[in-house]
Image: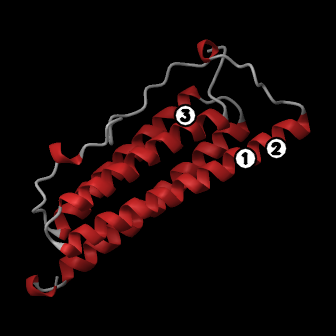
Amino acid sequence: MAHGLTAYEILEIAEKMERNAAEFYRKAASLCHDPKVSKLFNELAQWERHHIQIFVEMKEQLSEKSWQLGYYQPGRSRSSRPQVPTPPVFGDRADPSRELTGRESKIDVLVLAIQKEEYVIAYYTGLREFVLGKNNVQVLKDIIREENRHLKILTQSLEQIGRRRPGDL
């Protein structure tokens, strides 16, 4: 492959996915009748917005570094980039009504969020074949590490709920 994805392009993909995820969770919160589940969806949306900010800051740092080192490529055309599809895990329309009824339990919400995070991690892992250069691979690893941290928090939350008695939610 002549042209691989740059770290900046990887972060653009990540930012788009996080925006879709935040929108998905925000809309999901509005569908839920259970205030605790709605609150959880709002918290998930907030996590995704935090990820967006992290990725925006990483892009800014990369841009500054590229300018300083003389590597900035302002005219890199889309046609020279490898064609990498953004996964449909949250979709471009981020419409949760196709997956949710609004009557899901907190456990159902956590399981759904975990499945989505696992899918996103698998997607980023698969992106490695499109990435050239040690620095670009490191950015991808950083994104995967952040998503794994998110997955760990969700999994721990699910485990804690599983240990509670049914009336404790």
Query: What amino acid does circle 3 point to?
Result: Arg
The residue identified by callout 2 is 64
Q: In front: 101, or 142? A: 101
Quote the CA–CA distance across marks 2 and 3: 24 Å
| Residue 118 on image: x %, y % | 35, 50
Query: What amino acid does circle 1 point to?
Result: Glu
The residue identified by callout 1 is 60
Residue drawn at (66%, 16%) of the image: 77
Q: In the rendered structure, are the residues bearing label 1 and label 3 in contact, judged by CB atoms less than 8 Å apart?
A: no
Residue drawn at (60%, 56%) of the image: 54
Establish if 120 lies above or below 148.
above
Count neighbours of disc 2 (C-alpha within 10 A) and say few if under 14, some if 14 to 19, many if 20 or more.
few
Quarter of the figure that contains the N terminus: top right
Quarter of the figure that contains the C terminus: bottom left
For residue 161, which numbered disc appears in the image? none
Q: In the rendered structure, are the residues bearing label 2 and label 1 in contact, judged by CB atoms less than 8 Å apart?
A: yes
Count neighbours of disc 1 (C-alpha within 10 A) and say few if under 14, some if 14 to 19, many if 20 or more.
few
Q: On the rendered structure, is 3 left or right of 106? A: right
Count neighbours of disc 3 (C-alpha within 10 A) and say few if under 14, some if 14 to 19, many if 20 or more.
some
